[in-house]
Image (cartoon, rainbow, N blue to C red):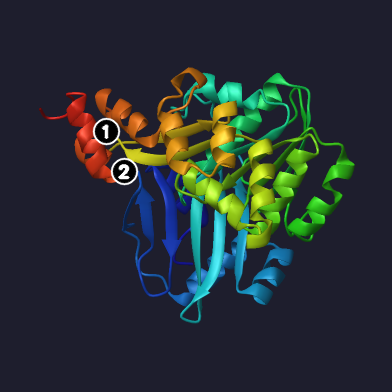
Amino acid sequence: MAVDINKLFQTMLRSGISDIHFKAGTPPMVRIHGRLMSSGFNKMGAEHILELAQILMNENQRAIFERDNELDMSYSVPDLSRFRVNIYRQKGSVALSLRVVPLQVKSFEELNLPGDTMRKLCQNTRGMLLVAGITGAGKTTTLNSMVDYINKNYAYNMIMIEDPIEYYHTNDKSSIAQREIGQDTPSFASAVKHLLRQDPDVVVLGEMRDAESIQAGITAAETGHLVLGTIHTMDASQTMGRLLESYHAAEQAGARARISNVLKGIVAQRLLESADARERYPATEILVVTSLIRKLLLEEKPGEVNKAIEQGQYYGMHSFDQDIIRLFNEHKITKEEALDASTNPDDLLVKMNTLRIGDA
C-alpha cells in the first residue's frame, strides 16, 4: 500500500493538517491553517486510493458508494481522533477527502467565540438557532460546542440527525440520541417523519442543505422545540434569503412570518489566519432576534437589519466588520487578512481609518 493509514492519521494530527485530498496520479494535497499545499507524499495510483477507500468503508457504505458514486462518512481511530470522509469519483477513478474531527468538543472560549452571547443563545427553550458559514468555516465545531453546553447544563431529550456523525456525545444532564443517515435511518425524510414521536426537547438537524431540511427545522421549531442546525451561507442576511428560498414564491409571504416567529439567532463565522500564521481565529457576525429585528424582517428591510446588528451590542450582536476590527485591534490578524476577510473591504478600510487603527 502506498500510504500506511495509521501513519497518515498520526502525521495529520502532529502537523496541524485539517484536510487531506487524494486523487489518482498526483501527490496528496493537505490544508494547514486554511492553506492548501503539497503533502510531500509520493504520487498515488488509482488502485492505491481505491484500496484506502475500501479500508475506510464498511460493507453497507461500500454498497452505497457503488450505487451513488459518492459517500459521506466518518471514521474513528480509538484514542487518536475521528475523521470526516468524503469518497467520490473523478475522471473514472476513486478520490477521497479526509478532515480531522477532534475527539473532544471544545468550549466556546476554547474556540475563541463570544462565550456570554453563545450561552445566552443556548438558553432559549424553543425556536431556531443557526450557525452559518462557507465550507471549512468551523460550523460543525461550533454547533457541537452548543450541543455540549446544553448537555452539561440542562436536562433535555436531544435528538440529532447527522450525515455523518462527526462528534460523539455522551449523556450528561441531557439524554442524547445521534442518528446517522444511511446507518440508523434510511433517509432524512424518514428520520424527520418519526422525530416528533421521540419526545424531543432539542432537535439538531446537522447541515440544513435543502428545502426539505430547512422546512422540517422550521416546523419543528413551530411545535415548541429548540432547533439547532448549520447552513451554508455567508452571513445573517444571506441566511434569511436562503430560508425564504426554500419555499415557492407564492408561499414566501407566509414563510417570512413563520421564520420571523421561530428564528432566535444566527451565528455566522469565517476562519481568519492569525498574524503569525500558526492558527486561525473565527470572525463572527451575530444576529439576535429582538422585537426590532423581527419587525424589520417582516418588513423586508435587510439594510435596516444590518444596521440593527451593528447597533445591537447590548444584546450581544455585532457585524463581521466589527469583529474583524476587534481581531485586528488585538493584533491577532494582519491588516491584509482583515481586508481579505471582509465582504466590503473598501467600507472596512474607511471604518479602520475612522477609528484611527491600522498603519496610520
Amino acid carrying label 2: it is Ala
Q: Out of 266 and 271, give the one closest to the viewer.
A: 266
Most distant residue in the bottom direction: 92
Q: Which mark is residue 223?
A: none
Q: How crowded is mark 1: few (under 14 residues within 10 Å), some or many (20 or more)?
A: many
**Cβ–Cβ under 8 Å for marks 1 and 2:** yes
- Asked if residue 3 shows in the view, the reply is yes
**The residue tagged with tag 1: helix, strand or loop?**
loop
Q: What residue type is labelled 1?
A: Ile
Sequence-first tag of 1 and 2? 1
- Neighbor class of circle 2 (other Cα within 10 Å; few <14, some 14-19, many 20+) is some
**Viewer-proximal residue, 32 or 191?**
191
Helix, strand or loop for disc 2: helix
- Quarter of the figure with the C terminus: top left
User: Which x, y percent locates residue 341?
Assistant: 31, 43
Residue underneath mark 2:
341
